[in-house]
Image (cartoon, helix red, strand yellow):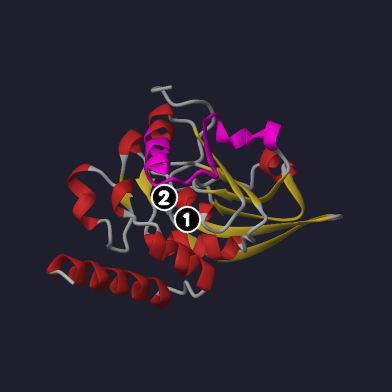
Amino acid sequence: MTGDDVDSAERKMQFLFALRSKGVTDARVLTAMEKIDRGPFIRGYFAERAYEDMPLPIACGQTISQPSVVGLMSQALKVSPRDKVLEVGTGSGYQAAILSQLARRVYTVDRHKRLVREAGEIFRQMDLTNITAVTADGSFGLPDQAPFDRIIVTAAAEDPPGPLLAQLKIGGIMVVPVGQSDTVQSLIRVTRHEDGFDYDELRPVRFVPLVEGLGRDS
């Protein structure tokens, strides 16, 4: 084993230890996060910080969430191998790549064409064939592919968006940050039942706002 291999293995062990210490304990989620390298999803100046547990800026004024938050959101979603998942907010593509290891099919939507294109290139390089990336206004979901077993939103809304709730199967789960400002947000898990929705508040978070319409680069 070369020195680089030793460094890589040690870095991966530290990465997984950091995830566990923040509460990511689901074995399938940890396996997915061990398999999917965060490095390719971060370009330029911040690439050397890819394995730190911190959010980092990406193109189009967006961010890639810190790995522990990606892990906690994936864990809260309770994805099964047969599930069809909708992600609203493709961003770097990292969250969708993690979900691809947990679900049967992942549809990911972003309002920025550039982000969808760049994420799609990484998915192809990693041979993640069960992800479909679409440029669209994610606040309206993907009606053509609904209903979904799971929905994850990686931008903060004032309330869980009605169109997304409507596209959730009975028994389905949605995880979404909710809050009216970028300083006070809560991660919410919504479970749909025959007679309505249950809401569980999970933890404080900080996400970019969910914005309607397509990005100016589209």
Amino acid type of the residue tagged 1 in the rendering: Ile
Q: Nearer the viewer, residue 93 or 128?
A: 128
Determine contact: label 2, label 1, CB under 8 Å: yes
Residue 59 appears at what percent x and percent y? 31, 36
| Spatial CA span between label 2 and label 1 | 6 Å
Picture layout, residue 128 above or below residue 22: above
- Residue name at image x 33 percent, y 47 percent: 41
Residue 77 appears at what percent x and percent y? 60, 60
Q: Give the range drawn in magenta.
A: 118-145
Residue 70 is left or right of residue 172, and the answer is left
Q: In which quarter of the image is the C terminus?
A: top left
Q: Mark 1 points at which residue?
A: 98
Residue 188 appears at what percent x and percent y? 60, 59
Amino acid type of the residue tagged 2 in the rendering: Tyr
Q: Residue furthest right?
A: 195
- Residue name at image x 51 percent, y 43 percent: 129
